Each structure stands twice: as structure tokens, then as C-alpha cells.
Amino acid sequence: MTSAVDRMFDPPGPRGRRTIRLVSIASAVVLIVLVAALLYVFGRSGGLDADRWSIFESAGVLKLLAKALLATIRAALAAGVAAMVLGTILALLRLSRMSWIRGMVAAYVEVTRSLPTLLVLYFTILMLPNYGVRLPVYWQLVLALTVTNAAMISEILRASLLALPKGQLEASLSLGLTRPRSIWYILLPQGFRAALPALVAQLIYLLKGTVLGYVISYEELLYSSRMIGEYTGFLLQSFLVATLIYLAVNTALSLVLSALVRRITDTGRSNALIDN
Amino acid sequence: MPRDPLVRLENVEKHFGRHHALKSINLEIDRGEVIVVIGPSGSGKSTLCRTMNGLERIDGGTITIDGQPLPEEGRALARLRAEVGMVFQQFNLFPNKTVLENIIFAPRKVQRQSKTDAIEKARQLLARFGVADQQEKFPAQLSGGQQQRVAIARALIMEPKLMLFDEATSALDPEMVRGVLDIMQQLAAEGMTMVVVTHEMGFARASADRVVFMDQGQIVEIAAPNTFFDSPRSERANMFLRDILRN
């Protein structure tokens, strides 16, 4: 079984294999020692004591964490879908043949992707009420995440659309499809596939951005973890649990999205950049 | 009897920036006629081919297809393109669609044919071109020759009145060229109107009704294939043929 990385290089010779084996063993030893040392020091100061972790057996704490995780996922899901849709629309508008549309969208994307999400969030809190718009905290967070991430997604997608071979559009046009339909049926699916790794990275980034909910008291995972930690006094343990949950959720997100898009846009050929 | 050509180009001009790619091109193509366009690289032969379905927009002159001026844009141009098949040097099959999906794509989306009808026609074409067993594969899993035969099927299923071949065999391995040329020869024999840009002089001799020789954006000579290859009138054609025969 060769991985994508293996295919990029010549197969190693006898000396290369020896070096690879040696480096692998050495780094495994270093890693084990490092983790053991960390656990030892942490345990010596009582960090691993059962009573510091037993809080996570209580139904109340678990329920709180579950609720917080759900809040994180709900915000990330809504913002993720909205940002993908808006980002796709922006990317397509930048392919418009009307230069003033391209210019306006370019300016919008340039501004929104430069702004920190936190700043956008402040604007939604402070500005929108002036216009009579009062959003629940959930939608304030979703809105801010959507605005900044859509800009990034549109840039990712635009780059991958522009990188597609020119012949794809020409083939579709010459079969009698109009330009918009050619873009929709032929270019967009291929663009999504090519952009997949960058899009997954952006969506994980978006999910992590939900922690900004704390400024508006939106009770997402990190907010609740800190509450649990402060309430029980075991802050570090709470954050470690939150870490594990983020890790699990983001890994799952990455796997599911990759499998999904790969299935929709199968080409029957392994692609060194996507498959491995 | 007045002539009723399928394609008429009058004083067609095309520039790429400062490069004058087509200089006052005049050409009439009759129904059922096979025109082979040859000439050195950069002579404008591909550009000429691509103007006939509007992939290259012309800067001057007129192109008339079946009595109608070539639409400049939009749905009208798309409708015209649906009736003009094009085969590219690089095949340009859709990599994320199977062979069958590639072929039924346009009949389904453009002509709104039912799926069963489109598949039935696609199967007939694939069988005829010797790639029936490849229909569930993706283009990348096929040889270049097979891909090009699928690309021809993809164009033919639209039942075009004109077929454009833009160096259709130039990207193929030598042993793949024959199979594709055979199909093109069959089409020519069946009376398809064809414009073929190629370096295959054998095909030109065997199937062309007229050979168009281009150089530096101009049509230098138009002649029946035997006349052209045995006694070209122009010095430029003479030089071109000598260069080719030397290789």
C-alpha cells in the first residue's frame, strides 16, 4: 500500500531504508519518553488523581458538556453551511464577465477576510441594534462566523476554479450548454474536489471560531468547560477534556467531509493531493 | 443553381492582441464536404476551426452556418453549438464523469432527452467505436485513443450537422492514431460535413474533398487533395510539404 507521499519520491534504496528505520525508532523512543515525562510530572503534582477527574462522572457535568458540545456544533453547522453557500456565490460572482461585479465582490472579500471574526462579532452586537435588528446570541455568532469564513471559502474556491484546465469549459460550451450551466455542471464539482483539503481546513477553523461565543455569553463547549473548571477548581482537567472533544469532533468532521466530497466527485483515479 | 453552402466565411478577421491570427478568410463549405486544413504551426488553422462554433470570437467579417449568421453570445450561440460537434486535441472529457455519463450529459441537459433514450444511443455509439466495455470507467482509466473515441461519440450523439476536429490525433501515441482516423474516415464516407485540422497527410489524401493550406493567418491555397499534394501551386505550400516529407 503506497501513500500519496510515497508516490512523490523514488522508492528508497537499502541505505534509505536503513535510515528510515533508524529515524523511526529514534523518534518513537523520544516521543514515548516525552509523553511519559509529561504524565509523570503532571501526575506527581496530583493532576492525574482520580478525585480531580471524578467530576466528569457526574451526570450534571456530563449533561452540561453535552449541551455545550451541541451548542458548538449547532453554531458551526449553521455558519458552515451559510459560509459555504455565500462563499460559493461570491466565488461565482468573481467569475462574472461584468467587471463592476467582479470589482465589488473583490472589494467585499478583501475587507471581510481581513477582519478578525471577533471584530465582526463586536460590530454585530454594537451596530445591528441601531438598525432595529435584534438577534439572539446564537445568530449573532453564526452571522459573524459566516461573514469572515465565506470570504476565505470564496478565495479558496476561486483559486481552484481558475486552476481547472481551460478545455473543460470549452468542451461543455461546445456541447451547447450556456456559460452559467457549464460552470454549474462541469466546473463547480471539479473545483470543489480540487479545493477539498483547503475547504476542510477552513471549516475546522470555523468550528474553532465558535469559542468567540464567550464574548456574547453563548454557552458553547469552551465557555462551559471554563465554567465547570472554575466551579470545581479543576480548570486544567476541564480544558483537557475540552481538548479531547474538539479533537474528536474535528477529526470526525474532516473524515466525513472528505469521504462525502470524494464520493460525489469520484474520478476513478487516485489523486496525489487528496487520496492517500 | 445557386450554391447553398452549410458554412460560409466572408472576410473573417481575428486578432490576439497585436498578433493578426486570421487575415480576411473566405471559405465556403458544402453540405457533406470534408475540408482538411493544414499548415505550419501558428498558421491560424486551429483558430479558424474554433471560430466556426464561436469558441473564438471574430473581429471582422461574417460567419454563416446553415443560412443563419453565427450568434455572438447567449442561448442562441449555445443552440448553434449544440448542432456543431467539436473534438479537441486534449479530448477534454469530463474527468469526474464516467464514459457513459460523459456521452449522455449533453443529450440530457441540452436536448432534454429521456435517460433511457440517451443511454440507448450512447451504447450504440460506444459499441460502434469499440469501447462498449468501457462505459462504466472514468476517462483517466482509458488510453488516449479510447478517450478520443469517446469524445467523438460525445459530439456525435447530438447529431450535429457539422463536425470540427481540432488536431484530434496530435496528442495520441502513434499506435492509437489509426483507430481514431478510421472513425473519422467512416464519418466522412457517411456524408458528415467535417472540418479537420490535422497533420495526417494520409487522411487528407484519402478523405478530404478539398485541402485548405494556411500560412501566417491566410488561406494560401485551396485544392483537391491530389492536386494539392502532387503539384502545389504556391511556393509556401511546396516548402511545407517538403518539410513534412523530410521527416
Image (cartoon, rainbow, N blue to C red):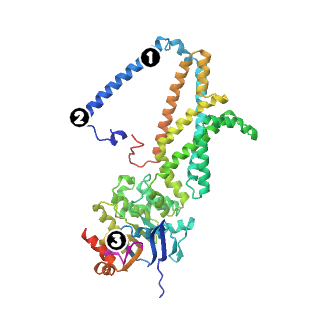
Q: Which amino acid type is shown beneath numbered disc 2?
A: Pro
Front label number (2 vs 3)? 2
Is B40 drawn above or below residue A33 in the view shown? below
Residue A14 image label:
2
Residue A3 visible within the image? no
Mark 2: secondary structure: helix
Mark 1: secondary structure: helix
Q: Chain of mark 3?
A: B
Is A190 drawn above or below residue A43 in the view shown? below
The residue located at (62%, 41%) in the rendering is A147
| Segment tinted magenta in the rendering | B204-217
Q: Which residue is mark 3?
A: B185
Q: CA distance from mark 1 to mark 3?
A: 77 Å
Residue A205: image location, x then y, percent: 54, 35
State which tag comes first along the sequence, 2 or 1: 2
Q: Chain of mark 1?
A: A
Residue A29 image label:
none
Q: CA distance from mark 2 to mark 3?
A: 54 Å
Residue A4: image location, x then y, percent: 37, 41
Crowding near the residue tagged with mark 1, few <14, some 14–19, many ≥20 C-alpha atoms within 10 Å: some
Crowding near the residue tagged with mark 3, few <14, some 14–19, many ≥20 C-alpha atoms within 10 Å: some
Q: Chain of mark 2?
A: A
> Magenta segment: does it hold B211?
yes
Q: Which residue is mark 1?
A: A39
Residue B5 visible within the image? yes
Q: Are marks 2 and 3 in contact (CB under 8 Å)?
A: no
